Image: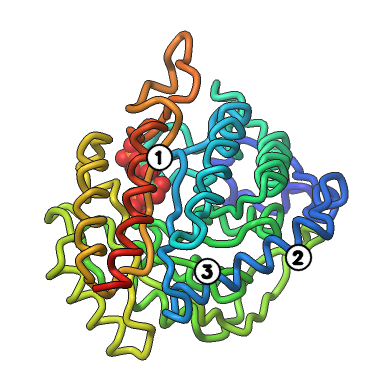
């Protein structure tokens, strides 16, 4: 290998095959601007979410939608249905659509719409970023706030202005890079417990992100930059179960509430009805939602929100299927629309009953 200005060392990049430039965040935001009406919705919903998470608003936050977006038409179709239900249940539920573009994999697999929008290993990330951003704007136009997982440290620059709630997943909740990222994010963020079920790492994530940090990042023009953040005090814990089993039972919720209380966070947690709390079964997930509704209706305190993986058709299919079923997940199994609508109405009724108990 010859030393040149492009390749100044022979010992680095021995396993890198190529670099290709991305558009800058400024370019992409300029092509697809948020605009005033959507900005108002994002601002208002972020503050409502923060109020629910801090118990200043007695509604239940529900982050509900597909495990991952692979088809924007189907995602928008789903969003239309959810927007109507969000309006119907608005007195009791604060509904945020789960619009997940980045999938953390246990080993390997399709990493989401931003990474590979054509689902075929062509990895057109610039197209993925634009497609993702366009969908966020379209969902906001239906009046629905959006929640997403932040996985790549650089991608939030392209989409975060349109996001009202963020998540850090079980596989990255202990990562300093992600905690630093959250410390600069403008919306409330939930930290999942670890894949082994350990809740303290999520509590530590909230504490770390509440502090200001100085770290490596990129600015809006895509330049490598030193980033200094103020800290994000709107963070909370999400119980998603783990290899030791589910953790949505009343005892686990009470233990998590005690852990967050010890570090001065509001004594509330979000429960993920999917993942290790349902063994990734969409049928089981519906039962978990029903159990939680019953407990909330009975007056159980401590649960500020629920996460539900839901799409139009129940179940899941392989991303490699020759012909994909419209509206069905290509990652984790999701509850179908009819079951979701019933579950959301039951949760709304439970919140009303819980207020009376
Ligand atoms: O929510 C999605 C999945 O549970 C997560 O991305 C891990 O998926 P995998 O175990 O299929 O890789
Ligand atoms: C990957 C996810 O969850 P977890 O991090 O809990 O596995 C998810 O919610 O898409």
On the image, the x and y values in percent for residue 133 come to: 70, 45
Residue 12 vs residue 20: left or right? left
Mark 1 vs mark 2, foreground winner is 1
Residue 39 vs residue 152: left or right? right
On the image, the x and y values in percent for residue 31 come to: 86, 45
Mark 3 vs mark 1, foreground winner is 1
In this orientation, does residue 151 appear? Answer: no
Question: Which quadrant would residue 44 be assigned to in this image?
Answer: bottom right
Q: CA distance from mark 2 to mark 3?
A: 27 Å
Secondary structure type for disc 2: loop
Earlier residue among tags 3 and 1 = 3
Total labels: the figure holds 3
Residue appearing at x 31%, y 81% in the figure: 260
Q: CA distance from mark 1 to mark 2?
A: 41 Å
Compared to residue 35, the image places residue 357 above or below, namely below
Quadrant containing the N terminus in the rendered view: top right
Mark 3 Cα shell of 10 Å, populated few (<14), some (14-19), many (≥20): many
Secondary structure type for disc 3: helix
Quadrant containing the C terminus in the rendered view: bottom left
User: Which is more toward the observer, 248 or 196?
Assistant: 248
Residue 266 vs residue 32: left or right? left
- Report the disc number at residue 341: 1
The residue at which mark 3 appears reads as 49
Q: Residue furthest front?
A: 356
User: Which is more toward the observer, 197 or 347?
Assistant: 347
Compared to residue 91, the image places residue 355 above or below, namely below
The residue at which mark 2 appears reads as 219
> Quick check: marks 1 and 2 in contact, CB under 8 Å?
no
Secondary structure type for disc 1: helix
């Amino acid at each position: 290998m010859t030393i040149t200005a492009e390749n100044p060392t022979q010992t680095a990049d021995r396993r890198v095959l190529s670099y290709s430039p991305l558009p800058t965040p400024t370019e992409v935001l300029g092509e697809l601007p948020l605009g005033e009406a959507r900005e108002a919705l994002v601002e208002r919903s972020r503050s409502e979410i923060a109020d629910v998470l801090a118990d200043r608003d007695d509604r239940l936050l529900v982050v509900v939608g597909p495990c991952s977006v692979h088809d924007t038409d189907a995602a928008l179709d789903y969003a239309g249905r959810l927007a109507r239900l969000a309006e119907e249940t608005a007195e009791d539920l604060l509904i945020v659509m789960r619009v997940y573009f980045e999938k953390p994999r246990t080993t390997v697999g399709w990493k989401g719409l931003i990474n590979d929008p054509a689902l075929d290993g062509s990895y057109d990330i610039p197209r993925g970023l634009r497609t993702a951003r366009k969908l966020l704007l379209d969902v906001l136009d239906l009046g629905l706030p959006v929640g997403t997982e932040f996985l790549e440290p650089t991608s939030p620059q392209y989409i975060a202005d349109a996001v009202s709630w963020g998540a850090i997943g079980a596989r990255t909740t202990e990562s300093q890079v992600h905690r630093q990222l959250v410390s600069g994010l403008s919306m409330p963020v939930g930290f999942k417990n670890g894949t082994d079920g350990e809740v303290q790492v999520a509590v530590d994530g909230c504490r770390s992100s509440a502090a200001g940090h100085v770290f490596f990042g990129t600015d809006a023009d895509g330049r490598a930059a030193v980033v200094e953040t103020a800290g994000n005090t709107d963070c909370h814990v999400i119980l998603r179960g783990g290899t030791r089993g589910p953790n949505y039972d009343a005892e686990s919720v009470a233990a998590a509430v005690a852990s967050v209380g010890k570090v001065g966070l509001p004594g509330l947690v979000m429960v993920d009805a999917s993942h290790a709390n349902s063994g990734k079964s969409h049928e089981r997930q519906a039962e978990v939602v029903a159990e939680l509704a019953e407990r909330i209706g009975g007056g159980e305190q401590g649960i500020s929100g629920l996460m539900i993986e839901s799409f139009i058709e129940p179940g899941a299919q392989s991303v490699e299927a020759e012909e994909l079923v419209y509206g069905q997940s290509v990652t984790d199994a999701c509850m179908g629309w009819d079951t979701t609508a019933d579950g959301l109405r039951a949760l709304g009724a439970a919140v009303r009953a819980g207020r009376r108990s």
